[in-house]
Amino acid sequence: MECRETVTATTVTSSAMMAASSPSSLSPISSPTGSFSSSPPPAIIVSPCAACKILRRRCVDKCVLAPYFPPSEPLKFTIAHKVFGASNIIKLLQELPEAQRADAVNSMVYEANARLRDPVYGCAGSICQLQKKISELQAELAKAQAEILNLQCQNANLVEFICQEMSQNQENCPQEQPNDSSPLFFDDWVWLGSPSGHENLIK
């Protein structure tokens, strides 16, 4: 009896050691389908927008600046940030509906560029220059239209004068036939061969 118990204990111990050393005991819990889970899925890296990158803050999923300041255009936010500030830009975009935010951002960037070029007048200076150019171009256009109208009137008068001259020439041509140019016939002239001698031609 003691020998049998010794053999049984030895068998159980060896089985436990083999189970502990087998690879299946070290693997994670298998899935219901029988396949073992491997490494965890890779994390999705989201690039922050240019605004959050410049401000050195975390770019959240619903960042109000992300649609209008992409990572590829950092200068766009830098210019607007220098003039208006990040807090004012965010506040303005939050107060506007989404359909008008893109136009508002473009306007802020344009005004910021104008303010950096001309710190005194800014965007108003650019508007005044454009209005001056428009006035000059309108004056040149009016002058060109007046010249075209003058040339058209001169052309019409010239055509009318030429038509009158041609009609007068057509009316005067049949009445200006000279008498000397009428043809002479032999019957109108008679050679007198009378006995009195040779006479002049008598019509």
Image: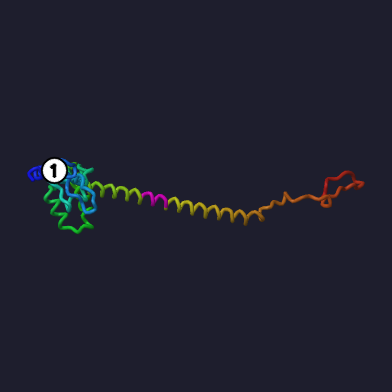
Q: Nearer the viewer, residue 60 or 110?
A: 60
Residue bearing mark 1: 11
Residue, far left: 2
Can you give x and y, in whole percent of width and height, for residue 137 in the image? Answer: 32, 48
Q: Residue at x 86, y 45 (%)?
A: 199
Question: Where is residue 76 shown, x and y percent of the image?
Answer: 20, 44
Whether residue 46 is visible to the viewer of this picture, yes or no, is: no
Dot 1 lies on which element?
helix
Residue count near mark 1 (Cα–Cα under 10 Å), binned few <14, some 14–19, many ≥20: few
**Vertical arrangement, residue 161 with respect to residue 16, above or below:** below
- Of residue 91 and residue 176, the one placed in the foreground of this image is 91
Residue at the (28%, 47%) spot, across then down: 133
Q: Main secondary structure of the magenta part?
A: helix
- Segment colored magenta: 143-148
Name the outermost residue toward the front: 1
Q: Is residue 52 left or right of residue 189?
A: left
In this rendering, is residue 117 above or below 67? above
> Picture coordinates of residue 100 (x, y %)?
22, 56
Magenta segment includes 30: no
Residue type highlighted by circle 1: Thr
Q: Residue furthest right?
A: 195
Scheme by which the image is coloured? rainbow
**Is residue 191 among the parts visible in the rendering?**
yes
Q: Residue at x 40, y 49 (%)?
A: 147
Percent position (x, y) of residue 145?
Answer: 39, 51
